[in-house]
Image (tube, grey):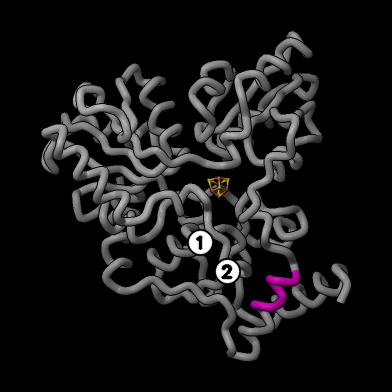
Amino acid sequence: MNNEAVIKEIKKLKKELPVTIVAHFYQRDSVYNLADITGDSLELAQKASKDPNPYLIFCGVGFMGQSVKILDPQKRVFMPRLACCSMARMMEVEGFHQSVQKLKEAAINTEDFLPITYINSTAEVKAEVAKLGGLVCTSSNAKEIIKEALKQEKKILFVPDRCLGQNIANEMGLRSAVITEDILSIQQADIICFDGFCSVHQLFTPEDVDFYKEKFSDILVAVHPECDPKVVAKADFVGSTSQIIKWVKAQPIEQKIAVGTEFNLVNRLREKNTFVLSSTKPECPTMNETEPQHILDVLVSIKNKTYLNEMFVDEETSKWAKVALVRMLER
Ligand code: SF4
């Protein structure tokens, strides 16, 4: 079946079945354009869990589909591709426990710190964070959540993204350390970060910013806080995916802008005077796994009751991970 026929069939089955298609901003256009709901991680978790349809086809990566399933266990969530965010995979439960142990070695006990996990983490890590009184954040709300958490006069254990934790610490004038650093550095830090990172946002370099600033004297540079702090330090605007979109759209049409985030999203902003802040094509390989044919395969399986790639989270993990997510959503 050619692509046109696949899309026609998807639209036909969508009319027959109580299904909602959800797509993250980083999905390829052919998938993104089929979605009923689009957004970044926070928007998708909020909107998708409130959607009335019993079946949800989630075009994104594993932790996103898991989050919806955890927030609304009655909903049947399907992933057209069982794609996993490379950052989420960098921290298993053992990695979290090892980090807690390292803090103990620095005489920072569980009552002395609050764990916060970026939403780009497995359900199991979210559950462990909840058990220690912690919560989830996204790149949209991380700063506010950290600000509130610091009122408890505790240190923050921030997992799994090192860059997001360091960038917020820098912005707020706080001291940060990476969990792999020496005991003294950890003891002196306000925010201790796990050493995970996004393989896509790591592609942007300070030299990329210099290149565009030298090429166009009046250009503005916007980057995602998953970029390295050295890149963030040179940018004019730092924000989550949704915040970047809003900021770019608010600029005058003649304003030149270079954006340091995933390619598919930046490409959609190109009607403005917008450039991708990289000489490479910074696509998220796992986000890009999904194609329209995979959506069709799931729709056919729902129709035939064979249910391809359904997401499940075990009850105990789900119970605790929900605590961490709800603490974020209800704050
Ligand atoms: Fe994960 Fe980075 Fe891909 Fe986002 S862009 S899903 S953080 S690997």
Residues tagged 2 and 1 counted as in contact (Cβ below 8 A): yes
Q: Quadrant of residue 205?
A: top right
Give the prevailing secondary structure in the magenta stretch.
helix
Describe residue 298's horizontal placement relative to residue 134 as left or right.
Answer: right
Residue 58 vs 245, above or below: the answer is below
In this view of the protein, which residue sits in the foreground, 285 or 60?
Answer: 285
Residue 300 vs 315, above or below: the answer is below
Residue type at numbered disc 1: Gly
Q: How many marks?
A: 2
Q: Quadrant of residue 293?
A: bottom right
Describe residue 203's horizontal placement relative to residue 278 as left or right.
Answer: left
Q: Which residue is mark 2?
A: 79
Identified at 20% across, 23% down, the residue is 184
Identified at 21% across, 28% down, the residue is 183
Residue type at numbered disc 2: Met
Q: Secondary structure at mark 2?
A: loop
Q: Could you classify mark 1 by the number of other residues whose Cα lies within 10 Å: few (under 14), some (14-19), or many (20 or more)?
A: many
Identified at 69% across, 28% down, the residue is 277
Q: What range is drawn magenta here?
A: 293-298
Q: Secondary structure at mark 1?
A: helix
Q: Where residue 274 sits: x, y (%)? A: 76, 29
Q: Could you classify mark 2 by the number of other residues whose Cα lies within 10 Å: few (under 14), some (14-19), or many (20 or more)?
A: many
Earlier residue among tags 2 and 1: 1
Residue 236 vs 165, above or below: the answer is above
Identified at 39% across, 72% down, the residue is 73
Q: Where residue 69 sits: x, y (%)? A: 43, 68
Locate the N terminus and report the quarter of the image it occupies. bottom right
Q: Where residue 139 sits: x, y (%)? A: 46, 39
Task: Name the mark on residue 62.
Answer: 1
Q: Where residue 128 sits: x, y (%)? A: 26, 55
